[in-house]
Amino acid sequence: MDKNIAAFMRDDVNTVGVRFFKDTRFTEDHHTKGTFTLLGEDYPAQYSDKVYTYITDIAFKEGDIATVIVAGIPRHVKIVRVDDDLAIDPKDSIEYKWVVSKLSIAEYEENIRKNKALTDLIAGAYKKNLRQQMKQVLLAELSDEAREQLLSITNTKDIKL
C-alpha cells in the first residue's frame, strides 16, 4: 500500500522544502549560509545543505519557520520552497513526514517592542526622578540666600525640599 496514501486523499495539503537550522557554535563552515530575520534585522544563520520535503496542511511562504519532528525530537526548519500541490511520487518508497506547526515570531517581536518602549519610558522617568532627588539634596544643604541665588542662576523655579 502507498505509504503516503492519506496525503494523496486530501485536497488541503501540499509539500514544502525545508532546510534545518545548524548550531553554528559547533559546526564547521561547510553548510549553506543564509540569514534569519528577527525584529527587522538579518542575523547570520547556517542551514543544512540538503532540502528535505515535508507534507503540510498549513499555509506557508518562503522564509517562514516551522517545527518538524525528527527521531522524536522537535526541530526548527526554514521553509525554502512551497509547492502548489503534493510534489511527491505516489509510488515513492519514502514515507514523508508532516510539518507540525508554523513558528510565529510575531508575538515574540511584539513583546520585545513593548519591553523596549517600557524600558525607555521607565529610564526617562528614572533619570528625571534621580535628577530631582539630586537637586533636592544639594539645595537642602544650602542657606536660603544661596538657594535663591542658585535657583536664579540655573533659571529653575522652585524645588520642593
Image: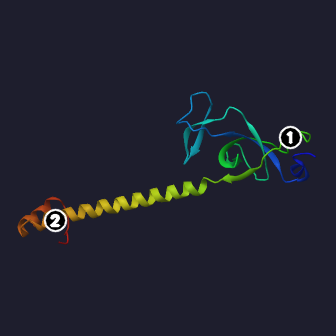
Residue at 77% x, 49% y is 98
**At which x and y percent is residue 106?**
60, 55
Disc on the earlier residue, 1 or 2: 1
Q: Nearer the viewer, residue 156 or 48?
A: 48
State left or right for residue 44 relative to residue 102.
Answer: left
Q: Is residue 76 above or below residue 149?
A: above
**At which x and y percent is residue 104?**
64, 54
**At which x and y percent is residue 109?**
55, 54
State left or right for residue 30 relative to residue 138.
Answer: right
State left or right for residue 143 relative to residue 46.
Answer: left
State left or right for residue 119 relative to residue 10.
Answer: left
When asked about the image quadrant of residue 138, the answer is bottom left
Residue at 37% x, 62% y is 122
* Mark 2 burial class by Cα count in 10 Å: few <14, some 14-19, many 20+: few
* Mark 1 burial class by Cα count in 10 Å: few <14, some 14-19, many 20+: some
Q: Residue 88, which numbered label? A: 1
Amino acid type of the residue tagged 1 in the rendering: Ile
- Residue identifier under label 2: 137
Q: Check disc 1 and report its element: helix, strand or loop.
A: loop
Of circles 1 and 2, which is in front? 1
Q: Nearer the viewer, residue 122 or 28?
A: 28
| Residue projecting furthest to the front | 71
Residue at 66% x, 48% y is 73
Q: Nearer the viewer, residue 129 or 92?
A: 92
Using the numbered discs, state the Cα–Cα distance from disc 1 to disc 2 in whole angstroms.
76 Å
Q: Is residue 25 above or below residue 148?
A: above
